[in-house]
Image: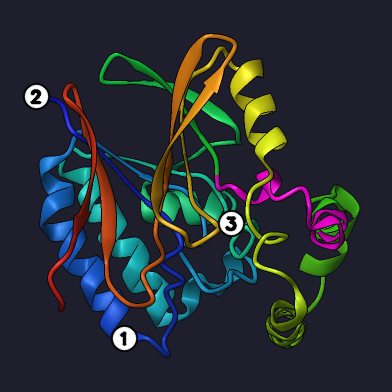
Amino acid sequence: MSVTLFVSDLHLCPARPATRQLFANFLTGPARQAAALYILGDLFEYWAGDDDLAEPFHAQVCAGLRALAEQGTQVFFIPGNRDFLTAEGFARASGARQLTEPHLVDIAGRATLLMHGDTLCTDDSAYQAFRTMVRGDAWRATFLALRLSERKDQIEALRRKSEHEKQVKSAAIMDVNADAVAAVLRSHGYPRLIHGHTHRPAHHLHRLEGHVCERWVLGDWYAQGNYLHCDESGCRYLILPAA
């Protein structure tokens, strides 16, 4: 039976070594038994550019992914809002194939749409405007032209601002918009949808024009490691033992 695994929102960083070790255990454990691993964004707390691969922490994570890919598990990556600056250097170092979203793929005979999930949070208009700006070629070129230390300083400032804004935004605004979910399901032929970003793991059923579509939301790794296991029998959440 072919097994495919999904994770997102690990937010790996040197300040959380236990989470990195948990991910390392996952890569040498359950992931090695899978045909494919999909990482749906925010693998890292942030990614300032591929020239940060010299950072030992980043190099260790990428080496673990490459070892997994070299032993036979296909590794795929959809960038999230924290690590959208990954490029060819990250792909070479990690052995991961980078995908654009939304990405439609057959998983165990089921059409499955993969996303990070932030584009579904359309009620947060301020965030969507910011996302459009930083995903543009002009902003990217200007930002990557800065020294790495300057980029990291700017990212840290943006993170502090984001955390402050989260304190005043309602939970509903930061969750997915039902109409946005319906629109993306409808436009892709009513597939199963798997995404992360909201940190609200759940299994939803959407009934649209006579179709019943599953939506699986992946959890973050702040409190515990977790992943979605999918095969011919369906999908189920699994929790990793503590490192």
Q: Is residue 31 above or below residue 169?
A: above
Dot 3 falls on a residue whose secondary structure is loop
Dot 1 falls on a residue whose secondary structure is helix
Q: Main secondary structure of the magenta part?
A: helix
Which amino acid type is marked by label 3? Thr
Name the residue carrying label 2.
1
The N terminus sits in image quarter: top left
Residue 238: % across, % down: 19, 53
219 left or right of 152? Answer: left
Residue lying at the far top of the rendered structure: 210
Residue 199: % across, % down: 48, 62
Magenta stretch: residue 125 in it?
Answer: yes
Which amino acid type is marked by label 1? Pro
Which amino acid type is marked by label 2? Met
Q: What's the distance in space between the residues labelled 3 and 1, CA to CA? A: 21 Å
Extent of the magenta region:
116-130
Proximity of marks 2 and 3: CB atoms separated by less than 8 Å = no
Q: Nearer the viewer, residue 30 or 58?
A: 30
Q: What's the distance in space between the residues labelled 2 and 3, CA to CA? A: 32 Å
